[in-house]
Image (cartoon, helix red, strand yellow):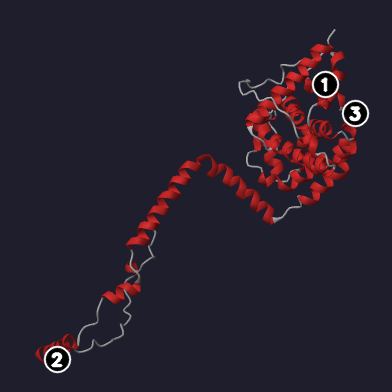
């Protein structure tokens, strides 16, 4: 079942006050989804671990800039996203940040649970995900991992809601089509 | 059948020990160093909590009050006069007025004579009965 950060009772207020136990709880909650998000964008284990570490250190330092405690997850992924973009720029992979979008504004808000995978499709799903352009992959990962809304994904990736909508629609269409082709 | 989230997390489950080591070796010490109790930090936390609990929930009311105060301040500034303006407007009495005042005083002194200064006689202490002294009530 998908866990949505906003519905959880996370000790963000305690973390803000500098409570180490509260930070540990937050770390345990977000360490793996955050790592998965970063790894699937940069495809380098050590670099991903470094980004996760830097993200949490930044979060410790700048928790006072978080306006709404309920948005902690989105804020944390936003820090990680910025670090991933910096990694990509350092590696000179600007071209991969570009994308060709089929804009479809009539698409309804997608549900992260509307795509279910059989066991034999898992490896193929991971491969197909890696083939998507970075902006679409990023939107799809945020949508799948944390069930963030379009507005939250737009905030995390610093883009327009309409652009996020198009990216998700396009990425999911490509994934579904390829998975259908692979199916026996 | 699995959701994409379950697939993604299960693919990277093996990294959890690395992440836990990261917490104990890097992040927990960094956090301890950062959260060493400081008065300034505590004040900031209290200030932030008050801002969130008192101001943010009723920000429209606060904004309305702020607007009202700004309007009052503008009206007050527009209608008030400075001390120098008032002093400039009030002219000192003329020489004729001053002379008339001195003459009136002299005339009054001729009519009723000089007013004697009241002599300052020290009051003598006269002891009164115990029942009239303040704060001393006999209890039977």
The image quadrant of residue B4 is top right
Q: Mark 3 vs mark 1: give the one in front.
A: 1
User: Would you name the residue on which mark 3 appears?
Assistant: B14
Q: Which of A1 and A150 is in front in this view?
A: A150
How much space separates mark 1 and mark 2, taking CA atoms?
A: 112 Å
Please state the horizontal and vertical placement of residue B113, each as a whole percent of the image: 13, 91
Please state the horizontal and vertical placement of residue B14, each as a whole percent of the image: 90, 28
**How many residues crowd mark 1 within 10 Å: few (<14), some (14–19), many (20+)?**
many
**How many residues crowd mark 2 within 10 Å: few (<14), some (14–19), many (20+)?**
few
- For residue A1, say whether it is visible: no
The residue located at (23%, 88%) in the rendering is B117
Determine the secondary structure under disc 3.
helix
Q: Mark 1 vs mark 2: give the one in front.
A: 1
The image quadrant of residue B24 is top right
The residue located at (86%, 36%) in the rendering is B19
**How many residues crowd mark 3 within 10 Å: few (<14), some (14–19), many (20+)?**
few
Relative height, residue A81 to residue B140 (above, below)? above
B57 displayed left or right of A84: left
User: Would you name the residue on which mark 1 appears?
Assistant: B7
A36 displayed left or right of B51: right
Q: Mark 2 vs mark 3: give the one in front.
A: 3
Counting residues from the start of the chain, the first of labels 1 and 2 encountered is 1
How much space separates mark 2 and mark 3, taking CA atoms?
A: 112 Å
Relative height, residue A149 to residue B135 (above, below)? above
User: Would you name the residue on which mark 2 appears?
Assistant: B106
Please state the horizontal and vertical placement of residue A136, each as a whole percent of the image: 74, 28
Count of labels in the image: 3
Q: Residue A77 carries which label?
A: none
Q: Quarter of the image containing the N terminus of chain A? A: top right
Q: Which of A99 and A115 is in front in this view?
A: A99
């Amino acid at each position: 079942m998908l866990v949505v950060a906003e519905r959880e009772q996370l000790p963000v207020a305690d973390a803000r006050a500098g409570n180490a136990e509260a930070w540990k709880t937050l770390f345990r909650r977000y360490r793996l989804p955050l790592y998965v998000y970063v790894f699937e964008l940069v495809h380098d284990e050590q670099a991903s671990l470094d980004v996760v570490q830097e993200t949490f250190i930044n979060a410790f330092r700048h928790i006072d800039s978080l306006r709404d405690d309920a948005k902690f997850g989105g804020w944390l992924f936003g820090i990680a996203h910025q670090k991933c973009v910096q990694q990509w720029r350092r590696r000179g992979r600007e071209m991969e940040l570009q994308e060709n979008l089929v804009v479809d504004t009539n698409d309804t808000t997608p549900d992260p649970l509307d795509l279910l995978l059989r066991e034999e499709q898992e490896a193929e799903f991971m491969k197909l995900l890696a083939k998507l352009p970075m902006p679409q992959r990023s939107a799809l990962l945020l949508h799948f991992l944390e069930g963030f809304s379009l507005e939250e994904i737009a905030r995390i990736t610093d883009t327009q809601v309409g652009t996020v909508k198009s990216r998700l629609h396009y990425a999911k269409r490509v994934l579904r089509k390829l998975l259908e082709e692979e199916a026996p | 059948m699995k959701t994409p989230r379950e697939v993604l997390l299960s693919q990277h489950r093996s990294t959890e020990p690395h992440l836990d080591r990261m917490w104990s070796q890097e992040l927990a010490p960094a956090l301890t160093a950062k959260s060493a109790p400081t008065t300034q930090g505590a004040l900031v936390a209290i200030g932030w909590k008050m801002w969130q609990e008192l101001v943010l929930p009723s920000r429209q009311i606060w904004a309305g009050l702020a607007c009202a105060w700004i309007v009052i301040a503008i009206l007050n500034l527009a209608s008030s006069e400075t001390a120098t303006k008032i002093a400039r407007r009030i002219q000192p009495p003329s020489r004729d007025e001053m002379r008339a005042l001195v003459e009136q005083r002299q005339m009054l002194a001729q009519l009723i004579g000089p007013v004697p200064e009241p002599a300052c006689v020290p009051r003598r202490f006269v002891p009164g009965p115990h029942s009239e002294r303040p704060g001393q009530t006999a209890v039977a």
